[in-house]
Structure formats: C-alpha cells, structure tokens
C-alpha cells in the first residue's frame, strides 16, 4: 500500500482530508493511484445513483456579457465574438424539442446580459414551468443580487449553477478584472443556498497560475459549502483573450479532481463536462468512470452554437439536439450506464434520508 493509497482510503472513510493531505495527493499521485481512486469513486456513485446518468438540456440563450473574465471567450472586450440573444419563443422552442427527446431539466445559461431584466427572466422561467410542470429549470446567469435570485426562485426556478472558479481569493483576482471579487462570488453562492435553490459551484482545472494548494482549497471550500452540484472542467484557452496562449488543463488531473470530489461529497451531482469531452474524445466517458453522474448535451439552436465559444475547439457545435442526445446515449451504454428520463434531482431532494 503506497502512502497515496492510504490517503485515498482515509478520504473514503472520513469524506475529508486536511489541506496538506489533499495537496500531497494532487502533487504526487501516479496513474495507479488514480485508478485506485476511480474504482472507489465509481462504486460510491453506483451506491447512490445506480447506473443512471442524468441529462440536462443546455440552452445557451445569450452570449452578451458585461464581464471581462480573462479566460472566457465571450468576455465583453472580445470584439471578434458575434453576439446573439434568443427570444422567449426561441427558448420555449428549444424546451419543446428537448422535452420530446426526454429531457426533464433545462439549463438556461448565458453571459451576464442586462437585456434580460428580472421581469424578462421571471417571465421566461414561469412560461417554461407552465408548459413543462414536470421539468426542473436550472439557471446559470452569473452574479445577481439576493432580490433577483429570490424573484427567479419565486417564478419557479429550481436550481442555480455558479462556479466559484477558484476558492483562493488571490488566485481569483488573477483570473478576473478588478470589477469582480471573490467575496461577491461567495456571497452569491450563500444567498442561492439560503433562498432554497439546489445550488452548484465549481472550478476549472489547470487555469493559469493555479497551484495544487489552490485545488486543495477548492476541496475544502466544497466540503464547507455542501453544494448539490459541482461543475469541474479543464481550463481551455480561448482565442482573443489574454490567456489564449496558455496550456489547457490536463485530462489526468481533471479526472483526479472528479474522483476526489466524489469521495469528498459522496452524493453530489457531478457533471462530466463538455470541456472534458473537448480535450479528449472519450473525456466524458472517462469522467463518468471517475465518479461523475451527469451529462449536459446542448439544446441551443445549431445556428448559434458556434457563437457560444467559451474556449477553442468546443465539441458538438454542428450537431442537432437529437444527434447529441443519441450520441451520449450510445456513449453511456458503452460504459455500462444508461440515461435516466427524470428531473435528476439531488438524492436528498428526491426524499432519500442519508
Ligand atoms: N455567466 C455565467 C457565470 O458566470 O456563471 C455562466 C456562463 S460562464 C461562461 C460558464 C462557465 O464557463 C464559467 O463558470 C467558467 O468556469 C467556464 N469557462 C469560461 N471560459 C472557460 C475556458 N476558457 N475554459 C474552460 N471553462 C471556461
Ligand atoms: Fe462572461 Fe466571464 S466573461 S461570465
């Protein structure tokens, strides 16, 4: 038994390690240690969620953004991005197509676009809930006030995804302009939880200046916040951004972080992200085998897909929703899993007592 495997055993037993222990694992794990971790992570996923993989239909409804995150392809100072917005009717149309393809969760994601005022957003949310009462609506619209979040919740939104990006405040400031602060990001997450949203945070792996210590902090942050979901994907450089010449995060480290997350929050909803599928043709399958249990195929109209380029070489930008859905079904089947026709709530929200 190597020292790293003993640490993985300790994490499995206690669902937490110290910052130093996480750091040591992240710095020193071998391929053999990673496989040891993935086997445990997969067993834990199966204990809570069986062989079911939850799907979420992603609707990228605007690529206008008032923010200027240094890594992001749709940042406001990227003048090469052709901007678009979807109307309420276009969004509802995506939901109709998605419903017919057995999606029971719709994720509305976009840049921080002031055009979508609280009134416009709550109208979109309540219209979706009226037409599809058996579906969950997830929002991913960035940082808002407590009152705006509350209005979305009261209009019927069920979940909110807001990656914290990095738990380390200094690192956060290296990735964002001065107008954005780690304190506000964390305030948003606390507000979302207190309002009653199923809340998701998350981070990029391999973002510029990131250290193993930063990733260890991310693990302790998620342990403390106890989110329902954690979105983890590799950083991938985007053309026409300050980080365009940086290296992508690696497949190996991203998978390792997924495995550590499954052991740290055993029942969490954990997507195998599109970014993971972008850096490796089998990235999403490997993500599931490392402990993930969610995939998020794209429901955006094909006409706008190539405009929502957060990073270079993004996959699935030419495929119809049905093609993505079928492709993922086959991919999941190839690793012994199947896509569930359900809202795919967090297991505690499904009524289970853990
Ligand atoms: N505006 C919303 C927000 O800030 O949460 C949602 C959209 S934002 C573009 C969605 C996520 O994309 C971010 O949280 C970030 O982690 C991820 N992202 C942006 N640029 C990326 C890049 N170059 N590589 C990998 N992920 C990236
Ligand atoms: Fe839009 Fe970062 S540039 S959320």
Image (cartoon, grey):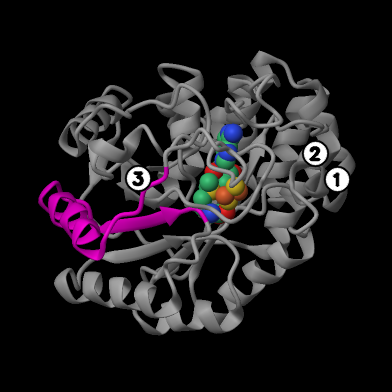
Q: Nearer the viewer, mark 2 or mark 3?
A: 2
Tell me residue 267's x, y (percent).
Answer: 51, 54
Determine contact: label 2, label 1, CB under 8 Å. yes
> Is residue 118 shown above or below 278?
below
Pick whichever of labels 1 and 3 is earlier in the sequence.
1
Q: Give neighbour class at mark 1: few <14, some 14-19, many 20+ (Cα, 10 Å).
A: some
- Disc number for residue 19: 1
* Magenta-span inclusion, residue 110: yes
Alpha carbon distance from label 2 to label 3: 27 Å
- Quarter of the image for residue 174 reads top right
- Give the residue at x 45% y 36%: 272
> How far apart are the two marked residues, 2 and 1, measured between alpha carbons?
5 Å
- Quarter placement of the N terminus: top right
Q: Which residues are magenta?
A: 83-111
Provide the secondary structure element on which disc 1 rests: helix
List the residue tagged with mark 2.
Answer: 22
- Name the residue that disc number 3 marks: 50
Q: Looking at this view, name the residue that lies furthest to the left.
A: 100
Answer few, some or many: residues within 10 Å of disc 2's Cα (few below 14, many 20 plus, some between 14 and 19): many
Helix, strand or loop at mark 3: loop
**Residue 332 located within the stretch drawn in magenta:** no
Local crowd at mark 3 within 10 Å, few (<14), some, or many (≥20)?
some
Name the residue nearer the viewer: 232 or 245.
245
Taking the image as shown, residue 38 lies to the left or right of residue 317, namely: right
Beta carbon of the mark 1 residue lies under 8 A of ligand 1: no
Q: Is residue 15 visible?
A: yes
Q: What's the distance in space between the residues labelled 1 and 3, CA to CA?
A: 31 Å
């Amino acid at each position: 038994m190597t020292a790293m495997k003993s640490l993985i055993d300790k994490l499995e037993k206690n669902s937490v390690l110290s910052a130093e222990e996480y750091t040591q694992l992240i710095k020193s794990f071998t391929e053999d240690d990673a496989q040891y971790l993935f086997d445990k992570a997969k067993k834990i996923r199966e204990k809570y969620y069986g062989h079911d993989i939850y799907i979420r239909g992603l609707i990228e409804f605007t690529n206008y953004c008032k923010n200027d995150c240094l890594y992001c392809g749709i940042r406001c100072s990227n003048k090469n991005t052709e901007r678009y917005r979807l109307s309420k009717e276009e969004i509802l149309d995506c939901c109709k197509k998605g419903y017919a393809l057995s999606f029971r969760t719709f994720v509305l994601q976009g840049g921080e676009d002031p055009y979508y005022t609280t009134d416009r957003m709550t109208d979109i949310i309540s219209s979706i809930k009226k037409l599809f009462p058996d579906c969950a609506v997830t929002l991913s619209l960035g940082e808002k006030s407590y009152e705006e979040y509350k209005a979305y919740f009261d209009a019927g939104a069920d979940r909110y995804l807001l990656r914290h990006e990095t738990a380390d405040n200094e690192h956060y400031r290296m990735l964002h302009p001065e107008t954005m602060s780690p304190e506000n990001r964390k305030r948003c997450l606390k507000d979302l939880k207190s309002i009653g949203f199923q809340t998701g945070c998350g981070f990029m792996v391999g973002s510029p200046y990131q250290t193993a210590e930063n990733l260890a902090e991310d693990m302790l942050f998620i342990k403390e916040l106890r989110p329902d979901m954690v979105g983890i994907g590799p950083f991938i450089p985007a053309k026409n951004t300050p980080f365009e010449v940086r290296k992508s995060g690696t497949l190996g480290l991203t998978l390792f972080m997924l495995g550590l997350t499954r052991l740290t929050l055993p029942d969490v909803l954990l997507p195998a992200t599109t970014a993971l599928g972008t850096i490796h043709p089998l990235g999403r399958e490997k993500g599931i085998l490392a402990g993930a249990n969610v995939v998020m195929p794209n429901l955006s109209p094909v006409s706008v897909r190539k405009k929502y380029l957060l990073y270079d070489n993004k996959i699935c930008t030419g495929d119809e929703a049905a093609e993505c859905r079928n492709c993922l079904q086959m991919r999941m089947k190839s690793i012994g899993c199947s896509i569930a026709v359900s809202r795919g709530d967090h297991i505690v929200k499904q009524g289970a007592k853990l």
